Amino acid sequence: MSLREPETYDVVGVGFGPANLSLAISLEEHHANVLTAPITSTFFERQPCFGWHRNMLLPSATMQISFLKDLVTFRNPVSRFSFVAFLHEQDRLAQFVNRKEFFPTRREFHQYLEWAEARMSNVVSYGSTVTAIRRPPEPARSPADDHLQLEISDAVGGGTRVVNARNIVISTGLRPRMPEGVERDERVWHSSEFLEKYGRVKPEELRSVAVVGAGQSAAEITNFFYEQLPHAQVHAILPAYGYSVADDTPFANQIFDAAAVDDYYFGDDRERDAFWRYHRNTNYGVVDDADIRHLYQVSYDEEVAGVKRFHYLNLTKVRTVERNGRGRTVHLRSPHGRGPQKLEVDAIVFATGYDTMDPAELLGDLDRHCLRDESGKHRVTRDYRLVTTPDLNCGIYLQGGTEHTHGLSSSLLSNIAVRSGEIADSIVRRRAEQDLVPAGAVRSGVTG
Ligand code: FDA
Ligand code: NAP
């Protein structure tokens, strides 16, 4: 641990994915436009360099949202960080427009994110994992003086250091979900680690593979296996009867509009429930229409050719996975034993989705100061701040993990430009308010 006095920042961001990258840009653009003292900020990212779901950058995968829902445009359409500015700088704007398509490939969008990140690299430290957030031992002299301490573990050098933050923005992303009782290993993968694990195996060793799940990740990986491993048997194991289409039709798509956040946040239980009941199929457990049609065509072409290597096991779940030499025996469960009860595979991918971010994991003891609702979930203000006990003046903001308060777009890219702007505005406004409170003054009430 360093003996130097820790540095203090107005904002410390935990994680540097698209959401906190968008926030970093928003804070910078705030400085340029507003005559306040600059907000000091720094971000910590555990990956060795910028990366956005790199293990799912499959060759032909496209974005699930319009290129206009980039890091900035919905907040500041004239920002120099827009996707259009990126295309212009790459000298590719005309060619992009000639495609007449709203959806770039994920590879191109990744290039865009890297391009934007390169302009903000002064505010981020890579290979730096935030391991704990806590209150300092000494009580604050005034609300403006209040701060939290973050402990950071550095991959290079292996050291640990501490920084102080007046505000923290936690944006640590989705957490891979595996079925209970199934452990990952060198032949049992979650989709979030797909390309890395795939790259460690010789393709010719993969003669029988399986993909579990009926969402976008499952469909993309199934197709990838089918195309990349022409010698292999490919098993798609679906809990559903068939892949269902992702509803991206215009009326339904309005749930991802910035305005829908207010409708959700200020709605009553029935209104919120309607979002989930009617529109879960805009995002979860669903697949792009074109991808479904492609997989069906693959299956049909096999019927015509009389050759079968794509095996579609619907209404089927995995019970257990057993090691069998280099391969794995997968025990299956299906109604009335309608399909095979077990499979021998060389690798199996669980594209079984993700859990949302839970800030409690990082907050540790500090979580006692964060208030919860009747169902035990964190209370969050409209400006994405955890509601805390009155003695805690620091802002703990969330980018992600707010589906219960702010709705479906919480873990997606759809609203990050506007959300980051709202968080930046809130930090600036609260600092201005705190600067007016004299030292020694005690705040009353819940900080919501
Ligand atoms: P993200 O997960 O991108 O970033 C979080 C970062 O925090 C990571 O880089 C992680 O390493 C870091 N981190 C975690 N813990 C840390 C710690 N303790 N210390 C330091 N760093 C830490 N949505 C959408 O709207 N359109 C789309 O097209 C897609 N496409 C898509 C593809 C795939 C394969 C997946 C899995 C998901 C999507 N999504 C999506 C949803 C996805 O959540 C979204 O695209 C963004 O990744 C959200 O950005 P965040 O910055 O919130 O999280
Ligand atoms: P997902 O949409 O949550 O789908 C998970 C699938 O796994 C569902 O079909 C689910 O079935 C199934 N499942 C869960 N637990 C299971 C179990 N124990 N046994 C069998 N099946 C199980 O996850 P995802 O496909 O990874 O998508 C996550 C997010 O990433 C989405 O926002 C998606 O749009 C995005 N994504 C985008 C792209 C892209 O941009 N090209 C690519 C991939 C993913 P139930 O529904 O019955 O639980």
Image (tube, rainbow, N blue to C red):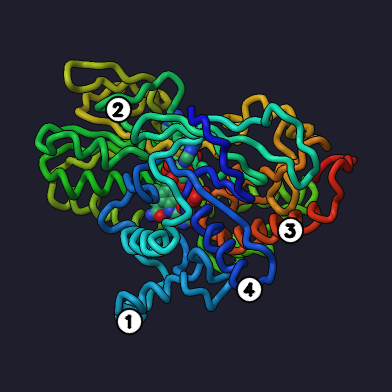
| Label whose residue precedes the other's in the sequence (1 or 2) | 1
Q: What residue type is disc 1 on?
A: Asn
Q: CA distance from mark 4 to mark 2?
A: 51 Å
Q: Amino acid at mark 2?
A: Val
Kind of residue indicated by mark 4 = Asn
Label disc, if present, on residue 188 of the rendered structure: 2
Element on which disc 3 rests? helix
Looking at the rendered image, the disc whose residue lies closer to the viewer, 4 or 3, is: 4
Q: Nearer the viewer, mark 4 or mark 2?
A: 4
Q: Which residue in the structure is indicated by mark 1? A: 98
Residue in the picture at 53% in, 32% down: 151
Count residues near mark 2 (Cα–Cα under 10 Å), then give few for <14, some for 14-19, many for 20+: many
State the residue position of label 4. Answer: 33
Task: Mark yes or no: residue 402 visible.
Answer: no
Categorize mark 3 by other alpha carbons within 10 Å: few (<14), some (14-19), many (20+). Answer: some
Q: Which residue is mark 3?
A: 263
Question: Vertically, is 96 above or below 323?
Answer: below
